[in-house]
Each structure stands twice: as structure tokens, then as C-alpha cells.
Amino acid sequence: EDGSECQCQQSECFLQNTDKDHVEDMTTLAHLHEPGVLWNLTTRFSTSKIYTNTGSILIAINPFESVPSLFGPDVMRQYVEAAGISGNGTAGLSPHVYMVACAAYRQMMRD
């Protein structure tokens, strides 16, 4: 992080993802291993993005503080409207527990 270079044996180095920014769905990482996952989660958390997907699995990191911009009627409405309850999905919206709730509701109504 300080810009200095170090040398190590190839066997000691993990492959690095080339994404400069974090990703919302970790299945899109080129190298899905523990250092890559931790880097992505840490980077997202540092920008107050506590939710991340790994495929259909939602990962939530407890921020240990109130994050009012993530919850409330307006945010919920965005996800409900995007899901269309009839089922177009929530493409374009960030991972969120409301996304999981909408998917569960759609599936329950189908079955």
C-alpha cells in the first residue's frame, strides 16, 4: 500500500484479480479465493456497501452502526417495483436483503 516493492516466491503468492473496483457479485471475480473475497468485502464495506452477492447467496457484513440510507419505505419500494412481484428480477439494483425478500415472495406465489 505504501508503493514499495517486495519479492516473494511464486508459491507464496495468490493470483490477483485485475478489477480496480469491488464487484457486487463475487462469482464475476476472475480468481475466487479467500484473499480475493476478503479484499472485495473489505473494499465494499469501506464504501458503506454491506451487502454482496455470491451467485444467489447474499453476504451481509454488520456495520455496527445505523445505516438509514439502506433501509426504509423508499428503498423497499425500489426493490419491490424493480422485482415487479410478477417477476422481472431486480437487475440494476445493488445487492440487498430486500432483493432476497422479493425473490422469496415471487417463488412463494408461484408454488
Image (cartoon, rainbow, N blue to C red):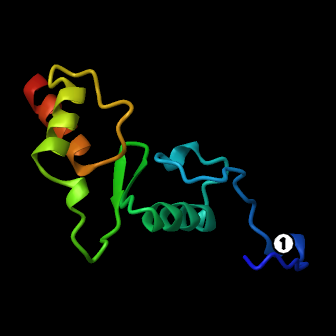
Q: Nearer the viewer, residue 81 or 54?
A: 81
Task: Find disc 1 in the rendering and name its residue.
Answer: 11
Identify whether 73 is placed above or below 61: above
Give how far across and how far down residue 65 sits, in percent: 25, 75
In the rendered image, which quarter is residue 79 located in? top left
Q: Is residue 79 left or right of residue 47?
A: left
58 over 46 or under it: above or below? above
Image coordinates of residue 5 in percent, x first then y, are 88, 77
Q: Is residue 32 left or right of residue 104?
A: right
Picture coordinates of residue 26 (x, y %)? 51, 50
Q: Is residue 99 left or right of 39 when viewed as pictured?
A: left
Residue at the location (35% across, 37% down)? 93
Total count of labels: 1
Say which residue appears at 12% left-offset and 35% top-offset: 105
**What residue is at 15 percent from the left and 42 percent from the top?**
74
Percent position of residue 109, x then y? 8, 27
Label 1 neighbour load within 10 Å: few <14, some 14-19, many 20+:
few
Above-or-below relation of 18 to 101:
below
Residue 76 versus residue 8: which sits nearer the camera? 76
